[in-house]
Image (spheres, rainbow, N blue to C red):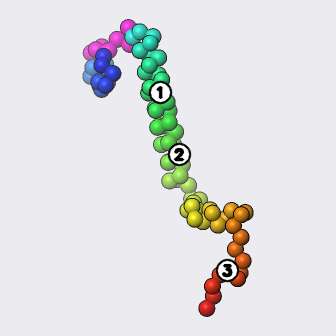
């Protein structure tokens, strides 16, 4: 099997791929290269789904800066007409 080849269901049914014949170093390489990508992809999808389903209001960066304890706004800072 080529590393960049797509694994397609019809090829699996025809037993084109023999998983038990992979040398351990190829399996280790696959795990190192792709397992973390797959894991983080799933985590990102779940995070995005939770954000979309949430009713909470998210603050933009300028607003979160204003909420910082280092930022102080007094009534004299607000212009009124």
Whether residue 41 is visible to the viewer of this picture, yes or no, is yes
Residue 81, compared with residue 47, is above or below; it is below
User: Which residue occupies 65% across, 81% down?
Assistant: 78
- Mark 2 vs mark 1: give the one in front: 1
| Apparent side of residue 14 relative to residue 39 in the rendered image (left or right) | left
> Are the residues at dot 1 and dot 3 in contact (C-beta closer than 8 Å)?
no
Q: Earlier in the sequence, mark 1 or mark 3?
A: 1
Report the front residue among 2 and 43.
Answer: 2
Q: Give me the C-alpha separation between circle 2 and circle 1.
A: 18 Å
Percent coordinates x, y for residue 68 in the rendering: 68, 62
Report helix, strand or loop for mark 2: helix
The residue where tag 2 is placed is 47
Whether residue 13 is visible to the viewer of this picture, yes or no, is no
Q: Residues within 10 Å of mark 3 (few under 14, many from 20)?
A: few
- Mark 3 vs mark 2: give the one in front: 3
Q: Please give the range of residues in magenta.
A: 14-21
Q: Residues within 10 Å of mark 1 (few under 14, many from 20)?
A: few
Report the front residue among 14 and 37.
Answer: 37
- Res 18 quadrant in image: top left
Q: Earlier in the sequence, mark 3 or mark 2?
A: 2
User: Which residue occupies 48% across, 43% down?
Assistant: 45
Q: Give me the C-alpha separation between circle 1 and circle 3.
A: 53 Å
| Apparent side of residue 32 relative to residue 79 in the rendered image (left or right) | left
The residue where tag 1 is placed is 35
Q: What label sits on residue 77 in the rendered view?
A: 3
Q: Give me the C-alpha separation between circle 3 and circle 2.
A: 38 Å
Residue 52, compared with residue 63, is above or below; it is above
């Amino acid at each position: 099997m080529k590393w960049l080849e797509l694994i397609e269901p019809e090829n699996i049914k025809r037993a084109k791929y023999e998983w038990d014949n992979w040398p351990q170093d190829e399996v280790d390489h696959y795990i190192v290269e792709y397992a973390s990508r797959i894991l983080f992809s799933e985590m990102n999808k779940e995070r995005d789904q939770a954000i979309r389903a949430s009713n909470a209001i998210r603050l933009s960066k300028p607003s979160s800066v204003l909420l910082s304890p280092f930022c102080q706004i007094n009534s004299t800072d607000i212009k009124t007409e």
